[in-house]
Image: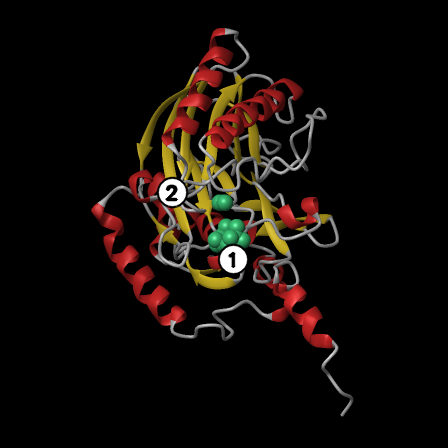
Amino acid sequence: MKVTFSIIKADVGGWPGHSLVHPKLIETAEKELAKAVKDKVIKSFHVTHVGDDLELIMTHTKGVDSKEIHKLAWRTFEKATDVAKELKLYGAGQDLLSDAFSGNIRGMGPGVAEMEFTERKGEPVVAFMMDKTEPGAFNLPIYRMFADPFNTPGLVIDPTMHSGFVFEIWDIMEHKKVLMNAPEEMYDILALIGAKSRFVIKRVFPKKGGKLPADEPVAVISTEKLYQIAGEYVGKDDPVAIVRAQSGLPALGEVLEPWAFPHLVSGWMRGSHNGPIMPVGIKDAKCTRFDGPPRVAALGFQVANGELVGPADLFDDPAWDYTREKAQYVAEYMRRHGPFEPHRLPLEDMEYTTLPNVMKNLSKRFKKL
Ligand code: F6R
Ligand code: MG
Ligand code: MG
């Protein structure tokens, strides 16, 4: 059978500040989605949060970009916003950038990652959710899962993976996309995705002629850019991703291995700073120190007959303690730079923050040299 796995997320109010989601918002969303299961709109769901983002994880059979599913998510965020307003949570309704639902939730503020695929005999799927960073933060780990043999030995020793994968890369400034083959075009892929504020991996596909259908993605990342939708700075995009694992794909452990390196991502305080991404269990998915550091959570599921079996909270494990410690060491090192680059983002990236307003006020005082 074909199943659709959707993660739709939004910040509809923080508690307190931009750190966390209030449990009442989660309860509200759970109630809405439970009703949708009863009405046979979706097959199953799990509601969670990472930092101040409310995350709706759903399975259904309506395909990607289904009006019915997007409407359900929009209505759920509206209901949660009502509660956020009652509790005067911070920035209530902040990511709902439109007054009314227009048929597709893309471009309206929330982030969306969806994929439709033929369910295998055993179907392990991981939902990755980040707070205080942007979609390009997924470039390095997704590349390493599907293209780096030093991360994924299956690329070398499993004949079903040996031919590699196809990367769909988006230029999010010029609104263009390109399909590229790994390993053949590895260097060209890296030439693009190393520039992570502009080129982002959107999807990964298996190669033709392999074990898995070449037109069904095995990884997908949300690429919504909030500032492009809002026309001004409204916080970072806080992306999510869905990754399938095992049997011709990276093993679960190969999907998780890239996160042992807390790489530098942009976001953190005021969406304006580089800092390490720290893998955490949901209980630690709150952004406290300097509104961060940026965090990533990973919930693992088996999908059975279109329904979620899980979640398993994959980073809630002492195996990640060393990475977390390293992330804190790097966070401390970066913080010591205060307002200086490269802790603060380069000017080009600060264009989408509140800094240009400060610069505007100063501009009158400059005299020609
Ligand atoms: C970053 C983020 C926070 C806020 C910061 C200032 O994505 O959400 O770091 O930018 O707390 O928030 P305001 O301007 O709402 O006071
Ligand atoms: Mg927020
Ligand atoms: Mg957030």
Q: Find residue 117 and report its horizontal and vertical position in percent.
A: 54, 26
Q: Is mark 2 within 8 Å of ligand 3?
A: no
- Which residue appears farthest toward the left when viewing the image? 318
In the depicted view, which residue is nearer to us: 230 or 279? 230
The amino acid marked with disc number 2 is: Ala
The crowd level at tag 2 (other Cα within 10 Å; few <14, some 14-19, many 20+) is many
Residue at image position (62%, 21%) is 71
Per the image, label 2 sits on a secondary structure element best described as strand
In the depicted view, which residue is nearer to us: 364 or 332? 364
- Which residue appears farthest toward the bottom when viewing the image? 369
Per the image, label 1 sits on a secondary structure element best described as helix
Q: Which residue is mark 1?
A: 270
Looking at the rendering, which quadrant does residue 194 occupy?
A: bottom right
The crowd level at tag 1 (other Cα within 10 Å; few <14, some 14-19, many 20+) is some
| Residue 25 in view, yes or no | yes
Q: Find residue 22 and report its horizontal and vertical position in percent.
A: 39, 34
The image quadrant where one finds the C terminus is bottom right
Question: Quick check: 74 above or below 306?
Answer: below
Label 2 to label 1: alpha-carbon separation: 21 Å
Looking at the rendering, which quadrant does residue 121 occupy?
A: top left
Q: Is mark 1 within 8 Å of ligand 1?
A: yes
Q: Which residue is mark 2?
A: 297
The amino acid marked with disc number 1 is: Arg
Residue at image position (47%, 35%) is 88
- Please state which of the two labelled residues, at mark 2 or mark 1, is closer to the viewer: 1
Task: Of the two numbered discs 2 and 1 on the same chain, state the one appearing first in sequence.
Answer: 1
What's the mark number on residue 122?
Answer: none
In the depicted view, which residue is nearer to us: 252 or 171? 171
Q: Find residue 323 and report its horizontal and vertical position in percent.
A: 29, 56
